Each structure stands twice: as structure tokens, then as C-alpha cells.
Image: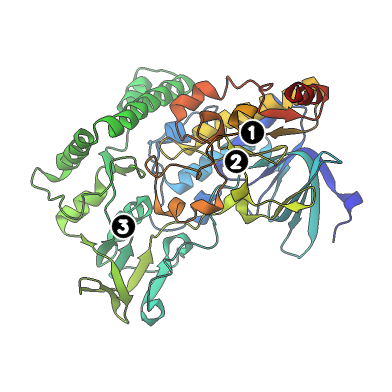
Amino acid sequence: MAREDLAQHVDVVIVGAGISGVGSAYHLQDQCPDKSYVILERMNTFGGTWETHKYPGVRSDSDLYTFGYRFKPWTSAPIASAQAILDYMGEVIEENGIDKNIRYGHTITSCKWSSADNRWTVTARTADGAEHTFTCTFLWMCQGYYDHQVPYIPPEWKGVSDFKGLFIHAQLWDPNIDYTGKRVLVIGSGATAATVVPALAEKAGHVTILQRSPTYFFCHPNQNELADRLREIGIDEPTIHRIIRAQVMHDQAVMDKRCVEEPDVVVEELRDLVRAYVGPDFQFEPHFTPKYRPWQQRLAFCPDADLFRLAAEGKVSVVTDTIDRFTDKGVLTNSGELLEADIIVACTGFRLSVLGNIPFEVDGKAVDWADTVTYRGMMFTGVPNMLWVFGYFRASWTLRVDMLGDFVCRLLKHMDEVGAHKVEVKLRPEDKDMAILPWIEAENFNPNYLMRDLDKLPKRGDNEVWRHNQNYWAEREAIPAIDLDASEFWYDNQRADTRVLEAAE
């Protein structure tokens, strides 16, 4: 076990070498070159979700002009394979020398804050059983929000072990599985199912989707016409990247607004996009008619309407029903239909992981995240010198990685300028009667993986300061304008002491 006097000290520890951690590292070394840092990564390589997911056809469901970083142009098709995204991330790491700061194979076992020392102590274990200790002034949590190792299997499913074929969750897919000519049953209807089904259908004998309820999809060619035209006339890639990001974000903002104000019109427009590929007589009832309005759950991109074309051609069947139980041959639905299969693939979503399920302590007291209140979905009451990167659902996750990268760097510089070693967010006097509510409003965004574990997440308040509003178009104005001397920020310097006296008066 490592001794404390051998601990490695850095200014910042970044947790995770996925899309968030790599982007955050770039911003830190670009905007705060005097700050030392390490990235602690559990796996033996970078990539996060793009490395852990191996199922057939794994691809983005956000366009890469906005999912890509603002500082590195994306030059290929807007919907990209996992390998293309990994190649892009690898270029960012190599071009900026980030690799020398990554410690792979480090599984964090605890994070402990000491107010006496104004620092975090982070312990991590490597595969050889050795324990390594890192201390830092600031902790930047970039490990995502779901468990990469244990997927969600509905506990109410009966008889899974009775099935004589292969049962596997998409998150645990083994690339060596041979499904050629096999009957494959995919359980689920979200973005993962829509990705894996067209890929499976290329070699499988037949693919059946069993869904509890349908999902909305946006069908469009996997290209950006404006980007292609700008390349054709010789515009440089950085300019194209900037213009297309602005175009996509504008279009997304318009769509988001319309989904609330005129959802029925949007639904018919989404259907028209499908009809353009499969003809005017395609039947949406009952298998392609969701029960919620568009964007109340994720509106996934379906390139070239591949899923709908396969359904129209009869290569993919869709059953909308619930599961009674598994049998030796497949799944028996509650309506009495037996769906026989050789392989069953569960696309049933994630198991929520709050701050990586890492045990946290502040001054010897364990942190229960459900007892904290979030500051704009990134900092938490009672937890100093720490920020969690939690991205967007309606816009590309990475937009917030870039935005919070700017915020953290500005905060670190501000702390240096005022001579502070500690910053903490606290409820203001005007917040004393504020309602304390669940992390996100169900009417705003309500996917099952979030709703079933909502009680594990930090709480929110009823004003914009104490909530993650999931609105990029509001935050892109609000977050850069945050006053770091506002009353919700408390520092360990003289100005903070003065503020206490002013509050008492």
C-alpha cells in the first residue's frame, strides 16, 4: 500500500479518459498551462462509452459537428461509428500531448476532502493490487453517469435462465458472437436498439424487435449538405466546423421549441421523413406511435431511415407488448405470443452511476449525493473544489464539456487571483424557502434509466441557479456570464469572511 508521503500531488485530478475527460484536459492545459494534472482511467485505454460498447453497428446518435469538440474540426459524415470517434479522440490526445498525463488501469476506490489541508486525496487500485495515492486541489469528475460494467436488466423478468439460446445485454456484447442466419430477438426500442438492429439484419436470418413502447426517430441522409457545399467551394475545415456547429445548434433549438409548442405538427413531419423512404402507405400504428411527445425522451437520429426500410421490407419484425416470462425457446408476451429466438439481445438501458459510485468523504463524513443540492448541474452544496461534467440529452453531450472546461479554468484563475484555496457553493439567503425537488422534471425529460434511480441523484431548487435545465441555448449565455463573486460562491479567503459578517448584519 502506498504511503502518504509518496503520494503524487497535482493541481487537478481528472477522472475518466472518455469524451469528457479528454476534452477537459485539453481546455485545462490550453487555458491554464501552469496547472499540473493527471487523468485517472479505470480501463487500459481511452474512449469511455465508445470503447466499452462493442455491439454491431455501434454509432453516435448525435451529429459529430456538435458532438466533436469545438477546437478540432470534424471532417466526415455527421453520424459516425465508434471507431471513427475513437480515432478522432486519439488524434486529440496525440496532437496535444495529453497521453503523458493519463494513468490507465487505475480504479478509484475513494475520494476524501480535507478542509485542514484544502485538498483532495484520491486513492486508486491497479490490476496488480497496488494502491496509488494522488492529492489535488481540484477534482474534475468526467466519468459519465452510468455503470460501464453492469447494465440494467429489469428485475421483474422471469425465467431468463430457462432460455436455451444465447442471452446477452448489448452493453456486454462479445464481437466474436456469430449471428449469421440466426433468429435474433432484440428487446428495447431506444437508440441502442435502432443502432444494433440494422447491423444485425445484415447477417441474421431474421430480427424481431420486442418493445414496450415505441421511440421517435429523425430520419435523414447521413450527410450535411451545407458542409459538403462549403467543401466543394474550397472553404477551410475550421470555418466549416464553426458554421455547421452553428447551423446544427440553431436547427436543434428550433426543433426543441416546436416539440413543446406544436408537438402534433412535429410528429407528422417526422412521419413524412419516414414516408420519403418507405412510401406513403407505411403503417405507423401501433408499432411506431410513441406515447409521449417528441423530445420528452431522446429523439434519435436514424440515418437514411434504415430501421424503417428494413421493417417495410419484412427483414425486421416489430412486436409492441410486455414480457410475461422467458421460455426455453424465447419470450412469451403477456398477450400470449411466443417469440422464438436463437439469440436474445437486451437493449434495456443503463444502470445509473452517480459520480462513478465512488465513496466520497468531506472532512471525514461520507457524502450522500441525494442530500446535496446541485449548482447548475455541475457543483454540489457541501462538496468543495469539485465539478461533475454532466452533459446534455437534447443537444450533444460535448457542448457542455467545452462550456464547463471554460468555466473550470475561469474559476481556477479566479481562485488564484483572490488567493483562495477552497471554493464551495451554498444556498443564498433568498433560497431559504426554496422548494427542494428531484434532479430533473419528469415533464421535461423522463427516460426510464433516469426515472428509476432519480432518488440517487442530487436535488435541484426551483430557480435556474440550483438546477440543471438541460437547455444548451440558455446555458451558452448564462454560464460564461456567471459572477464568481456572487453570493452562492464561498471562498476560504478574507472576502468570504467579510461576507459572513455582512450576512450576519
Do the numbered discs 3 and 1 sit on residues whose CB atoms are within 8 Å? Answer: no
In the rendered structure, the answer to whether residue 57 lies left or right of residue 210 reads right
Q: Nearer the viewer, mark 3 or mark 1?
A: 1
Check the image and name the residue furthest to the front. Answer: 505
Task: Determine which of the numbered discs, if any, sits on residue 197 in the image.
Answer: 3
Give the residue type that dot 2 points to: Val
In the rendered structure, the answer to whether residue 374 lies left or right of residue 56 reads right
- Residue 11 in percent (x, y) is at 78, 36
Q: Which residue is mark 2?
A: 373
Sequence-wise, which precedes: disc 3 or disc 1?
3
Do the numbered discs 1 and 2 sit on residues whose CB atoms are within 8 Å? Answer: yes
Where is the C terminus found, in terms of image quarters? Answer: top right
Q: CA distance from mark 2 to mark 3?
A: 40 Å
In the rendered structure, the answer to whether residue 90 lies left or right of residue 39 reads left
Give the residue type that dot 1 points to: Leu
The colour scheme is rainbow
Determine the secondary structure under disc 1. loop
Q: Which residue is mark 1?
A: 427
- Residue 158 in percent (x, y) is at 37, 76
Sequence-wise, which precedes: disc 1 or disc 2?
2
Determine the secondary structure under disc 3. helix
